[in-house]
């Protein structure tokens, strides 16, 4: 007989007074990695009508307590029980929008099932980015944080790694579970082109004051190659940042981010042959995603359409 999977979102059945999620959060930023989710989280955090969980990337709705790898990885899964997750929203007062941001949810079938079961009315925000630029950014972030020693050429020669960073199959899980209209889809390129207009559009879609302007001077989760690895580790430690967020003035946190960003050098541009090869890899996925979302993507991302 198969073992029943433990659902940490489920209230204590033996205690009828045990609360569930009680409709919180009602906004979930589901991804994608390296597509502006940190900026969106910070912008929303500053808005007086939006409450965001103190921990970005709780990953609670994707946490599987039966998975040994999840149990070992405390940095990736810092929130593990229903009570801990509810604690993330204890500070809510009258904010109409209550949210969290965990890009891992885009790749998790478990997260889809739990959102559908426990938070069926939650809004789902999806950030997308040119897949070639996002792939490059993912690789540089892994190098920056000491999570890979592969060269760029070795990385893009790995078919499984390339497939992991395609969009369509992951987005399709959410469209099939919730319908296209439930997804708020926004673009990293729009954020880069005009952050002020992006924020107005973002807040308008969340039905909060669209005239509010957050701090747009700080680059959040900036990519690049660190000159000093020690300084980078000190300014990017998740646990330190979470504790500091509740203890020190926001201006100090912004100053630390500025120091971290100045420590990053711009990476060299991609070779033309690499761009051509990666366009061929990601174009079919973008074409499928166009049909799924009813949006123009191949031309937006300059992936080039095959000649007929």
Image: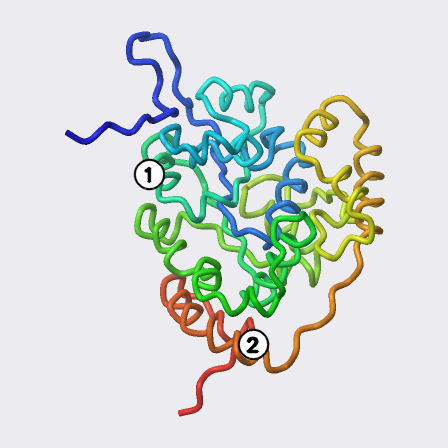
Whole-number angstrom distance, CA of label 2 to CA of label 1:
34 Å
**Left or right: residue 308 compared with residue 187:** left
Task: Say which residue appears at 39% left-offset and 32% top-offset.
Answer: 64
Residue 42: x percent and y percent?
Answer: 67, 40
In-front residue for pair 112/40: 112
How dense is the environment of label 2, judged by Cα within 10 Å: few (below 14), some, or many (20 and up)?
few
Find residue 105 and name its label: none
Residue 168 appears at what percent x and percent y?
A: 40, 61
Residue bearing mark 2: 302
Residue highlighted by disc 1: 113
Residue 226, horizontal then vertical, whole percent = 78, 53
In screen coordinates, is 72 left or right of 219?
left
Expressed as whole percent of the image width and height from the top left, the position of residue 194 reads: 70, 60
Crowding near the residue tagged with mark 1, few <14, some 14–19, many ≥20 C-alpha atoms within 10 Å = some
N-term-proximal mark, 2 vs 1? 1
Which of 86 and 193 lies nearest the eye of the viewer? Answer: 86
């Amino acid at each position: 007989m198969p073992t029943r999977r433990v659902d940490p979102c489920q209230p204590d059945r033996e205690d009828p007074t045990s609360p569930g999620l009680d409709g919180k959060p009602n906004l979930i930023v589901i991804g994608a990695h390296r597509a502006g989710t940190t900026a969106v989280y910070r912008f929303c955090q500053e808005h007086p009508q939006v409450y965001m969980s103190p921990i970005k990337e709780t990953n609670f709705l994707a946490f599987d307590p039966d998975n040994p790898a999840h149990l070992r990885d405390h940095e990736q899964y810092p929130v593990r029980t229903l009570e801990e997750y509810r604690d993330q929203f204890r500070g809510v007062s009258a904010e109409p929008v209550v949210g969290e941001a965990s890009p891992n949810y885009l790749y998790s079938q478990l997260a889809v099932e739990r959102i559908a079961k426990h938070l069926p009315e939650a809004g789902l925000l999806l950030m997308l980015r040119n897949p070639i630029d996002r792939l490059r950014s993912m690789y540089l972030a892994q190098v920056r944080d000491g999570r890979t020693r592969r060269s760029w050429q070795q990385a893009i020669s790995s078919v499984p790694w390339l497939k992991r960073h395609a969009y369509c199959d992951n987005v399709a899980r959410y469209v099939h579970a919730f319908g296209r209209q439930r997804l708020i889809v926004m673009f990293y390129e729009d954020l880069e082109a005009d952050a002020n207009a992006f924020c107005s559009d973002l807040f308008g879609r969340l039905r909060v004051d669209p005239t509010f302007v957050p701090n747009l001077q700080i680059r959040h989760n900036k990519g690049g190659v660190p000159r000093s690895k020690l300084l980078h580790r000190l300014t990017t430690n998740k646990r330190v940042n979470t504790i500091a967020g509740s203890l020190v003035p926001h201006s100090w946190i912004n100053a630390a981010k500025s120091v971290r960003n100045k420590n990053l050098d711009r990476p060299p541009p991609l070779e033309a042959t690499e761009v051509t090869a990666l366009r061929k890899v990601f174009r079919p996925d973008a074409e499928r995603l166009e049909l799924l979302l009813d949006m123009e993507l191949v031309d937006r991302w300059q992936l080039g359409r095959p000649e007929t």
